[in-house]
Amino acid sequence: MTIDFAHFTPYASLFGGILIGLAAFILLAFNGRVMGISGIFASALTNHPVGGLWRWFFLAGTVIGPLVYLGFREEALLVRPVSEGTMLYIGGFIVGLGSMIGAGCTSGHGICGLARLSPRSFLAVMTFMISAVVTVLIVHSGS
Amino acid sequence: MPVFIALISGVLFGIGLAMGGMLDPAKVVGFLDIFGLWDPSLAFVMGGGVIVNLIGYHGFIRRMGQPVCDARFHLPQKQSFDMQLIAGSALFGIGWGITGLCPGPAVASLFTNLDTGAIFLACVGGGLLAGKVISSQFWPA
């Protein structure tokens, strides 16, 4: 294992993580809702919009957030795609499919579930971390 | 009030994702590439998020009878392990490894990645809906 110090951003990433944690805490403390994006997005698409209006507001905030962040800095946001075309879109479909069947993704299981010490979330996080590491090893090794 | 809270929470979440590096697929893959040139940054995103919530949940929320703006906490009730949890999470990991984007960054990238953000988000949405149909067919509640 070699550490990639050229791209390592411990402070920005820790601060970003703290903001994500605060976002989840606020949503649960005030609205009683778990900040799981796959669940919020899926329910926004399928539930009646009036009862679940908060979901659309949350998603709108998520879209606005990076623009707010960009307003405070000089340089553009670094976005380097790792896959394109059919591969990217099939990958996106699998991301949605898997997180729905597995009842959560990196936010719901990863941030919220682990903090609640949920055994299901521990198993889910272990599983998707292993499968993502193996997938990267096969698809992106040497890139 | 709840919609305003949701908006604030979403904005904080979006800023956190952008600042943490989660909107850059190559950085995510750099984190997952533990056998190659490894960028541990995203462990700090995860760690920061979990620690804040660990304190928030066990220090505050568990002592609250109900949330400020709702009658009850809507927490997952299921405790048991099942095949869906493992199979779904494994699938999700494959998609995350291929694209370097999970659902939160997929939403947050709508305007930061104008080339493919909208189509990618639609693909994630399609996968979620397909997953909902498959779950209700094979594992009715």
Image (cartoon, rainbow, N blue to C red):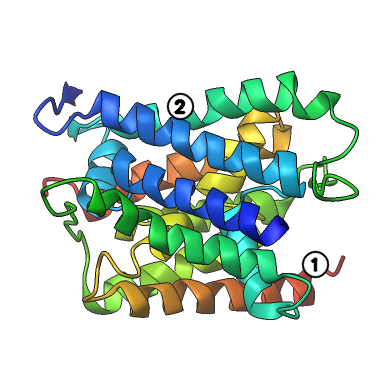
Residue B92 vertical placement versus A142 (above, below):
below
Residue visible at 38% across and 47% down in the picture: B15
Q: Quadrant of residue B2?
A: bottom right
Residue visible at 50% across and 45% down in the picture: A128
From this viewpoint, is residue A68 visible? yes
Q: Nearer the viewer, mark 2 or mark 1?
A: 2
Q: Nearer the viewer, residue A18 or A103?
A: A18
Q: Amino acid at mark 1?
A: Trp
Q: Which residue is labeled 2 in the image? A: B48
Please determine if labels 2 and 1 lie on a single subunit.
Answer: yes
Q: Is residue B33 left or right of residue B54?
A: left
Q: Nearer the viewer, residue A29 or B137?
A: A29
From this viewpoint, is residue B87 visible? no
Residue visible at 56% across and 58% down in the picture: B7
Q: Are marks 2 and 1 in contact (CB under 8 Å)?
A: no
Viewport quadrant of the N terminus of chain A: top left
Mark 2 or 1, nearer chain start:
2
Q: Residue A82's x, y, as percent?
A: 20, 59
Q: Residue B115's x, y, as percent?
A: 21, 76
| Crowd around label 1: few <14 · some 14–19 · many ≥20 (10 Å) | few
Q: Which mark is residue B129?
A: none
Q: Amino acid at mark 2?
A: Gly
Q: Tag 2's secondary structure?
A: helix
Chain assignment, label 2: B
Q: Nearer the viewer, residue B23 or A86?
A: B23
Q: Residue B131's x, y, as percent?
A: 63, 72
Q: Which residue is labeled 1 in the image? A: B139
Chain assignment, label 1: B
Q: Residue A111's x, y, as percent?
A: 56, 37
